Amino acid sequence: GRIGPGFFPRILGFTAIAVTVLAGVREILSRRAEKPVTQAEAADDAAEPDLGRHPIALIGFTVAATLFVGLFGILGAVVAGVLFLGATLWFLDPEHHIRALIIAIAVPVLLYLAFQTGLNVGLPQGILPLG
């Protein structure tokens, strides 16, 4: 009757994928409903920072999140986390590869240690012989 290890991370993963897919669908639908932009509006838009509408990044993140959830139990929490964070940070922040690499390795390892040793949550270790 007890929920098995990895159940909560799968819930979070599937929720993240669902939210991302929903955002993608809304993005596609909003692009279809857009009206043509005048020159004055284009000039106003050029002066403002670009804060949204990045469908390629959204699709890439959706694919990465899907692979993360799929590989979580096979490769383990640490390896899947490193691959997911590494790929997304490398793509989303191409000017800071060293920082992306450090974050991609440090965060999953620290989260694994916190959940495994601190909270005694049974995360899948996958292909690494961890403790």
Image (cartoon, rainbow, N blue to C red):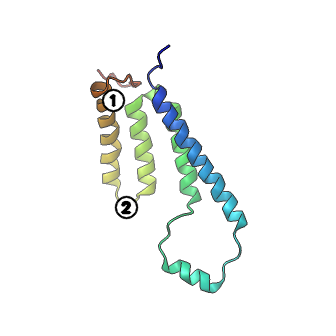
Relative placement, left or right, of 95 versus 88 is left
Residue at 42% in and 40% down: 83
Image quarter where the C terminus lies is top left
* Residue contact at pointers 1 and 2, CB within 8 angstroms: no
Q: Amino acid at mark 1?
A: Phe
In the rendered structure, which disc, 1 or 2, sits on the residue that comes first in sequence?
A: 2
Toward the front, the furthest residue is 1
**Image position of 90 with respect to 125: above or below:** below
Q: Please tell me in which quadrant of the rendered image residue 123 appears.
A: top left
Mark 1 or 2: the one toward you: 1
Name the residue that disc number 2 marks.
95
Which residue is at the front of the view, 127 or 46?
Answer: 46
Q: Tag 2, which secondary structure?
A: loop
Query: Is disc 1 surrounded by few (<14), some (14 to 19) or many (20+) residues within 10 Å?
Result: some
Regarding mark 1 in the picture, which secondary structure is present there? helix
Name the amino acid type tagged 2.
Glu
Instruction: Please state which of residues 91 and 25 is positioned toward the viewer in this rendering.
Output: 25
Q: Residue shown at 29%/32% (left/top)? A: 114
Residue identifier under label 1: 115
Number of labels in the image equals 2
Above or below, comparing residue 56 to residue 129 in the picture = below
Q: Quadrant of residue 14?
A: top right
Q: From the viewer's perspective, is residue 52 above or below residue 120? A: below
In percent of width and height, residue 115 lies at: 33, 29
Tell me: residue 36, above or below residue 20: below
Determine whether, in the image, residue 97 is placed left or right of residue 80: left
Please give the name of the residue rendered at 41% of the width and 57% of the height, measured from the top-left corner. 93
